[in-house]
Amino acid sequence: MNAHEYASANADRFLSQLQDLLRIPSISTDPQRVADVQRAAQWVADDLRRIGMQRVDIMPTAGHPVVYAEWLGAEANAPTVLVYGHYDVQPAELEAGWTSDPFEPVIRDGRIYARGASDDKGQVFAHVKAAESLLATGSSPVNLKFLIEGEEEIGSPNLSRFIDEHLDLLRADVCVISDSGMARMDQPSIVYALRGLVGMELEVWGPAQDLHSGQYGGTVHNPAQALAEIIAALHNPDGSVAVPGFYDDVLPLADDERAELERTAFVEADWRKATGAPQPWGEAQFKLHERIGARPTLEINGMAGGFYGAGFKTVLPARAIAKISCRLVANQNPRHIYELVRDYVAMITPPTVRSELRLLQAGEPAFVDRNTPAMQAAITAYEQGWGKPPVFSREGGSIPVVADFNHKLRLPVILMGFGLNDDGAHGPNEHFSIEMFRRGIQTAIYFYEAIAKQQP
């Protein structure tokens, strides 16, 4: 029995194991879930030991731990593959629109529904099961290292330092990351660009304390209103960002790249189905898929101020707050963008209130060379696993560590996604196609086999 046959024979067991992992509510942003995050790290480490990895460690950081594992038993001069993923997940509550408990996996219509199913437990677990299939049927043709972290969903604040402190441990010939999607199951695609991220918090103050609106209304600039006015001024009527200098470093799309991206273009009907929005919004001179992958954004992720509980309270709030994020494209610097937004907010803040924009997190955008030997191995793997060659696409999301792997480890990074764009990552009813999970395992095996044929 070879590795591919082993994976097919054990497909049901692999799915059952994934369900066990999905039951752990490893929400990295929730202080009350610290023990669950640790439990998920332990579960992943235990499975890596069970499949035969030679070394498995749960390594502490200033936040949640990193799970590291390695198997270095390949033939002399065999290349080493570093697999990156994350075991932490976004928050999820039943009342947020889930049709079933987000941490009790349910299978419906060939999909497994649970928080983290696609982002990223299901996708990184495909690589773990590919490694098991290889080791259980002889040995792997490549050396394998796994780096599975617990803070990706909060911007990987401690991973860069971890890499700095473990450069020798993490040395490899190529890094593969499965934490992205494709438009359709019948057409594989490889993501070659990811957007960076800047996360900010805007606070607006007015009076020293909450005030009676009957006594002071009309004389005090309500901080909630002032916040809304500031936010409204962050965009132009055409949907573009109004911050001066925001687009200065954005690289224009070349004609050949635009033509390649057109092969994975969003059909508006599919966009409407996926979003539920009445019609598109944004820069009309760019198509939907270009706005998602090739253009930077500024988004309001949340607002709060004053009284918004049951009943009514006629109060002028002393403060209001908003969470703001920017998705950035290649050549944009997160720190510089934060400074531009900060200075613009300060400029447009009315003198009747005070404001402060604080930087919470930052991650660089990533751009992957489509012409490397490692990319050719990925193309071959998809051709074998899917039966047709992949197309190339840009991804609107962010994986902060990609830039660190490029700059610090000098690694070519392959973004080998096994999810679908409409898996609902970060939203209610997140799901992962069982067929995609199984194809992902087979494709990962093919990738390791293809890389083994190259010189390290």
Image: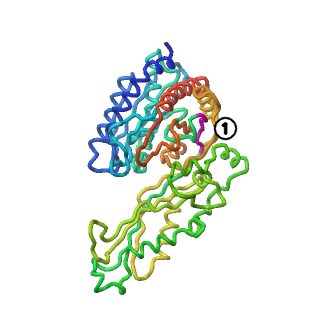
Query: What x and y, as percent, mark residue 403?
Result: 52, 46
Would residue 166 be found to the left or right of residue 93 on screen? right
Residue 417 falls within the magenta-colored stretch:
no
Q: Is residue 411 visible?
A: no
- Count up the numbered dots: 1
What amino acid is found at the position of numbered circle 1 in the picture?
Asn
Which residues are the magenta region? 186-192
Q: Along the line of sight, which residue is nearer the eye, 150 or 285?
A: 285
Query: What x and y, as percent, mark residue 431?
Result: 44, 40
Q: Is residue 28 visible?
A: yes
Q: Secondary structure at mark 1?
A: loop
Which residue is the extreme one toward the right?
A: 255
Would residue 455 be found to the left or right of residue 429 on screen? right
The correct choice, above or below, for 57 with respect to 320 in the image is: above
Residue 188 falls within the magenta-colored stretch:
yes
The correct choice, above or below, for 184 with respect to 286 in the image is: above
Would residue 246 be found to the left or right of residue 32 on screen? right
Q: How is the image coloured?
A: rainbow
Quarter of the image holding residue 208? bottom left
Q: Along the line of sight, which residue is nearer the eye, 425 or 203?
A: 425
**Residue lying at 47% horizontally and 30% vertically, measured from the top left:** 127
**Residue lying at 52% horizontally and 28% vertically, measured from the top left:** 439
Q: Quadrant of the C terminus?
A: top right
Query: What x and y, as percent, mark residue 28?
Result: 34, 47
The correct choice, above or below, for 281 with respect to 73 in the image is: below
Label 1: few (<14), some (14–19) or many (≥20) C-alpha neighbours in 10 Å: few
Query: What x and y, as percent, mark residue 412?
Result: 57, 38
Location of mark 1 (residue): 371
Quarter of the image holding residue 314? bottom left
**Residue lying at 29% horizontally and 84% vertically, measured from the top left:** 214
